[in-house]
Amino acid sequence: MIHSTAIVSTEAVVDPSAEIGPYVVIEGTVRIGAGTRVMAHAVIRGTTTLGARNVVHPGVVLGGEPQDLTFRDAETFLAIGDDNVFREHAQAHRGTLPGSATVIGNGNYFMQNAHVAHNCRIGDHTIVAGGALLAGHVELADRAFVSGNCVVHQHVRIGTLALMRGLSRTSRDVPPYCLIDGTHTVRGVNVTGLRRAGFSAARIAAIRGAVTALFARPVHLGRALDRLETQPMTDDVRHLVAFIRGSARGVCVAPRRGRAAVAEDTES
């Protein structure tokens, strides 16, 4: 299952059921799990681990040195779970500080030229679309969606089931369930994503009510949270509030001009 033109380090461990295509380069102490397919011209380097049934398309680079001027040739790691897809020329780098790691969970989909920088933490079943850039130490929670050519500043957290519309950018944390565009501006609720995740109409209504109270127009967010917490809250709303309360960078903002109704994401 290893093509004759592939170059595979003697330190690497490749499961017998994995498939290594033509002109693939595997350097260092790489571990490749059962059923993983690595296509032509991909490069996997360093102390990188791929679990089972991953698909690595042509030109992908996994485990390269971090693009960080503080990196000093330390032993760092890239840990990838199961059932992930890396499309053409996607990249994921190792950690920066000695012993640190970039960690990618299970079932994620990285489209062409997606970039995952050093020390990112990616959950499960996320999508990072073509040309999207995740800077160092970004945290992407389960089922979050980063659309094409989005830019995420280092140390930003993106909450579960949040959606960044195409060409948007953020240097602030993106709250769970929210839909943002422009410069870290909340435009609504990711209703399509919530429905696909099996959320009931009642759960979605509670989330929409909370997001409306917090982000429909500019408000003092601390006081808005205080008011929200005096009312009965569902588990989803409590999670939203806790995420915002725990933000070190500050969270995305309401639209700046006028009152903007919180709208559903109607993408199919």
Image (cartoon, rainbow, N blue to C red):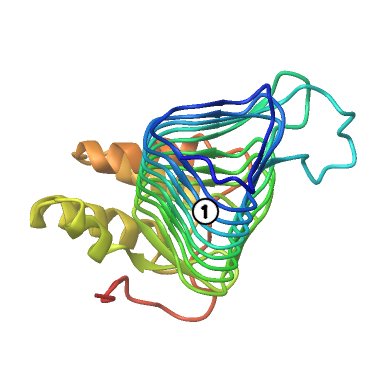
Tell me residue 153's x, y (percent): 67, 53
Residues 169 and 253: in front is: 169
> Residue at 65% across / 52% down in the picture?
23
Q: Is residue 162 visible?
A: yes
Q: Nearer the viewer, residue 80 or 164?
A: 80
SS for dot 1: loop
Q: Quadrant of residue 139?
A: top right
- Residue 121 image position (x, y, % from top left): 54, 36
223 sits left or right of 199 in the view: right
Vertical position of residue 58 compared to residue 24: above or below: below
- Per the image, the residue denoted by label 1 is 39
Q: Nearer the viewer, residue 24 or 1?
A: 1
Residue at 50%, 60% in the rendered image: 87
Amino acid type of the residue that numbered disc 1 sits on in the rendered structure: Met
Residue 184: image location, x then y, percent: 56, 64
Is residue 182 toward the left or the right of residue 242 in the image?
right
Residue at the extreme front:
4
The answer to whether residue 92 is visible is no
Name above or below for residue 158 compared with residue 245.
below
Determine whether, in the image, residue 95 is placed left or right of residue 60.
right
Q: Residue at x 45, y 27 (%)?
A: 15
Residue shown at 34% from the left, 52% from the top: 161
> In the depicted view, which residue is nearer to us: 116 or 237?
116
Number of labels in the image equals 1
Residue reaching furthest to the left: 201
**Mark 1 Cα-neighbour bin, 10 Å: few <14, some 14–19, many ≥20:** many
**Quadrant where the image shows the C terminus:** bottom left
Seen as rendered, the residue at the extreme top is 99
Image coords of residue 11 (percent x, y):
67, 21
